Amino acid sequence: QVQLVESGGGLVQPGGSLRLSCAASGRIFSINAMGWYRQAPGKQREWVATITSGAITNYADSVKGRFTISRDAATNTVYLQMNSLKPEDTAVYYCHAAIRTNPTGHFYPYWGQGTQVTGSS
């Protein structure tokens, strides 16, 4: 079994900062890309950022320059540092990881349970 557990969400004023964390645990042989998605009320889930196993990062245009994704390979943890938060960043944020559970298997997608981020004064 593999689990992704997020933490760090909360209420923050516009212009403020939050740091999300997501730790993967369980039967993990290796992890490829890790990333973050978000889903605002009444909207579809959208991609936010990705970091590869080689630490190459990509961001959605809406968060570029404000959010930073990073990972700690030793602890299978991915982070999302969110600065200059806007009300439109309000959403449930989901962690995603492509994980292989044995040396010959495929990488399969796993999701966290989500953490709420609310940008409001």
Image: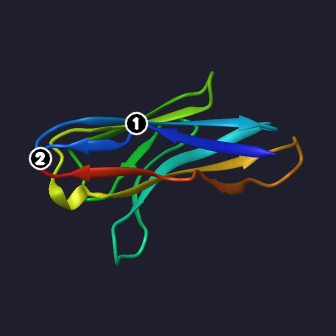
Q: Secondary structure at mark 2?
A: loop
Q: Is residue 111 at least partly visible in the picture?
A: yes
Q: Amino acid at mark 1?
A: Gly
Q: Residue at x 20, y 44 (%)?
A: 65
Locate residue 61: give its quadrant. bottom left
Graded by Cα atoms within 10 Å as few (under 14), some (14 to 19) or many (20 or more), the crowding at tag 1 reads some
Across and down, in percent, residue 71 comes to 50, 31
Q: Is residue 37 above or below residue 6?
A: below
Q: Is residue 120 above or below residue 30?
A: below
Across and down, in percent, residue 18 comes to 28, 36
Q: Is residue 62 at least partly visible in the picture?
A: no
| Front residue (pair 111, 109) | 111
**In the picture provided, is 101 more to the left or to the right than 57?**
right
Q: Which residue is mark 1?
A: 8
Q: Secondary structure at mark 1?
A: loop
Q: Which residue is mark 2?
A: 14
**In the picture provided, is 113 more to the left or to the right than 31?**
left
* Residue closest to the far top: 74
Q: Residue at x 49, y 53 (%)?
A: 114
Q: Amino acid at mark 2?
A: Pro
**In the picture provided, is 104 more to the left or to the right than 64?**
right
> Distance of mark 2 from mark 1, alpha carbons?
17 Å
